[in-house]
Amino acid sequence: MYHQTTALSPQPNNNMLLTTSIEVRNLSSAQYAHNDFKKIETDVILATEDLADIVSQGIIDDAQVIYDKELAKETISDTEKELLQHVQLPIAIRAAYNYNRSNLVTHGDTGRKALLDKTNESMAWEWMIDRDDHAAIVKYQKTVDRLIRYLNKTDNQKWKASAQYKEALGLFIPNASVFSQYFSIDRSEMFFHIIAPLIREIQLQRIKPAIGEDYQTLITAMKGNTLDDDQKELLSYIQSAVPLLTIAKAVKRHSIQVMPEGVVQGYKSFTQGLNVSQAAPQASIEAFSNYLDKDAEQYFDQIKRYRQRHNPEALNYKLLPDNDPKKKYART
């Protein structure tokens, strides 16, 4: 009964937020309660570190204090229970997903083998495994989204002091809800915080040169909720362009498979219309990125016209590009 002893005998102060197979099973619904926890322990550690990268180590540390108190049979408040459950849920789902992906075969002296009861079991088809993996990733993303919304709702100070939270401050697209109004990311807070550095990069490289001295004024007015009608017009053009440019970069720098359904569906819809010669994954991604970049240009034209109309003397952003005869293409 070694397995049961391992699953049912957690010890406090172990620097882990899950210590039994029963906990992983109850939270993920993707493990047997009698499994040897030692086999999934590494996946729990890695999943915890991954979550810390998204919501900060401070949140993980707070949850660890609560968990250690719970293991020590100390009283914890309802608020503490809520935070702990919100943190444990994505860790359990991610750990189970990682473990299941690496547990398709056994590893022994005679090589890798698939062990199963041939009378009552059969190996899953590849498409079944793919669907199961996809469902697990979607569930993981939603539980991380749920955690971030909880931290925002409860005004968690560790979260607000984190680098991850501060990264989104001063962005013209301040949160996942605003982003999803212009390009669907399923209001995924997790994905938004992953691409927040890309949004800032686009603001500095593309938006700031386009709007000149209006840049800091607009950010200040947006933060202070003092936008006038003209600034609201300018902001609408910026907020229409930035998500398109962000996704154009994101599909090159992040895996399509881990993106929200809204992004994946947009990509699939686009690639279905490509020629067979363009069907290679890298070529499809490049074409999709270029398509989004081109779509964003119409909003840059609106920005240029806005500046020309409101402050023509300050306009130094050319309406027509310079055509270099050395290049194989030209724009008019």
Image (spheres, grey):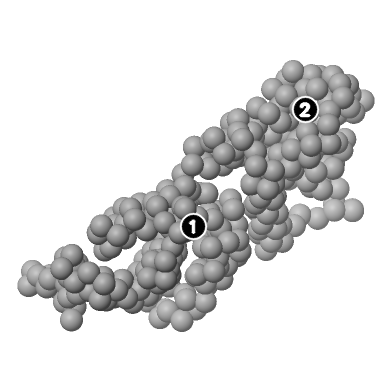
Q: Which of the marked residues, 2 or 1, is nearer the chain's N terminus?
A: 2
Secondary element type, mark 2? helix
Please name the amino acid that badge 1 sits on.
Asn
x, y (%) of residue 225? Answer: 49, 57
Q: Is residue 37 visible?
A: no
Say left or right for 240 vs 67. Answer: left
**Is residue 225 toward the left or the right of residue 113 in the image?**
left
Q: Amino acid at mark 2?
A: Tyr
The residue sitting at 53% across, 63% down in the picture is: 178
Query: Which residue is more in the foreground, 14 or 240?
Result: 240
For image coordinates 17% across by 75% down, the residue present is: 320
Disc assigned to residue 225: 1
Left or right for 172, reference 40:
left
Q: Which mark is residue 313?
A: none
The image position of residue 28, as x and y in percent, is: 78, 46
In this rendering, does residue 271 appear at all? yes
**Residue name at image x 18 percent, y 81 percent:** 332
Between 22 and 235, the residue placed more toward the observer is 235
* Quadrant location of the N terminus in the rendered image: top right
Give me the residue at 11% from left, 73% from top. Answer: 323
Comparing 200 with 229, the one in front is 229
Res 219 quadrant in image? bottom left
For marks 2 and 1, give the CA distance: 40 Å
Tag count: 2
Residue 67 badge:
2
Residue 310, by quadrant, is bottom left
